[in-house]
Image: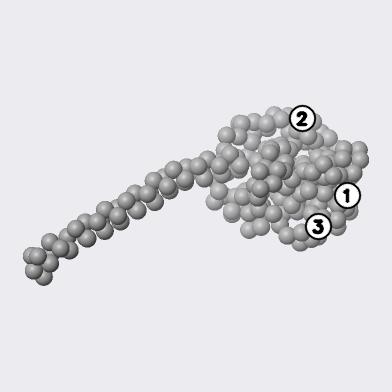
């Protein structure tokens, strides 16, 4: 290549390098700004900033209330949750996914017992308040103890809903709606994948 050809080509090469560098810098800047927001949001939704202890109401195998106590919150690295849970339970409880409607036999579970958190075994709902909502998800008109669940505003998918989580481990359980039966008028629409049913002893 002659010197003249090189001189003609150099500005193009320099422009390409500048443009390429700017693109890389823009991508890096976007990722650098966006990634921490993603991490922060995930931490907020799934356990970030949880207190060291929470007040929980305990229940025995026969469904009777055994007392109220301050207990340590259950916080684990993401890979530990993956090892502990099934893929569906992990996606629902740790990443707020929703299982398909009518996909669990728990919808038709009518025996006496307690529905506990699949992540930490905290008592969440009683069979005494379960009802057939026709939605395809286990539904209850009240938690077994208000202290055992937390409710937060959820604006995902362009909707305004109230998300329900286990207070002790921050596992996502489902949502609560104001179209349930008396006496509360509420429908706690839960993912079966977030629950474990324990038959009354």
Residue 77 as seen in the image, left or right of residue 101: left
Comes first in the chain, label 3 or label 2: 2
Residue at the spot x=12%, y=67% of the render? 5
Q: Position of residue 196 (x, y in %)?
A: 75, 51
The residue where tag 1 is placed is 131
Q: Name the one closer to the observer, 137 or 55.
A: 137
Determine if residue 80 is in view. Answer: yes
**Residue 88 tag number:** none
Q: Where is residue 191 in the image (x, y as percent from the top left)?
A: 74, 52
Residue 100 as seen in the image, left or right of residue 46: right
Q: Name the one closer to the observer, 5 or 137.
A: 5
Q: Name the one closer to the observer, 95 or 126.
A: 95
Residue at the spot x=39%, y=46% of the render? 29
Q: Position of residue 185 (x, y in %)?
A: 87, 40
Residue at the spot x=30%, y=55% of the render? 19
Label 2 neighbour load within 10 Å: few <14, some 14-19, many 20+? few
Q: Distance between the residues labelled 3 and 1?
A: 11 Å
Comes first in the chain, label 2 or label 1: 2
The residue where tag 3 is placed is 136
The residue where tag 2 is placed is 68
- Are the two marked residues, 2 and 1, in contact with CB atoms closer than 8 angstroms? no
């Amino acid at each position: 290549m002659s010197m003249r050809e090189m001189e003609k080509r150099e500005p193009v090469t320099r422009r390409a390098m500048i443009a390429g560098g700017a693109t890389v810098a823009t991508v890096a800047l976007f990722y650098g700004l966006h990634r921490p927001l993603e991490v922060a949001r995930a931490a907020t939704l799934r356990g970030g900033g949880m207190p060291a202890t929470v007040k929980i109401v305990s229940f025995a195998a026969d469904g009777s209330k055994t007392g109220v106590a301050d207990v340590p919150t259950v916080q684990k690295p993401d890979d530990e949750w993956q090892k502990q849970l099934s893929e569906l339970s992990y996606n629902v409880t740790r990443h707020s996914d929703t299982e398909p409607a009518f996909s669990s036999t728990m919808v038709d579970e009518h025996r006496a017992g307690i529905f506990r958190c699949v992540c930490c075994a905290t008592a969440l709902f009683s069979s005494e308040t379960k009802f057939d909502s026709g939605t395809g998800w286990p539904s209850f008109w009240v938690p077994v103890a208000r202290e055992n669940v937390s409710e937060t505003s959820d604006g995902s998918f362009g909707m305004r809903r109230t998300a329900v989580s286990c207070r002790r481990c921050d596992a996502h359980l489902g949502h609560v709606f104001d179209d349930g039966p008396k006496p509360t008028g509420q429908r706690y629409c839960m993912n079966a994948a977030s629950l474990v049913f324990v038959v009354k002893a």
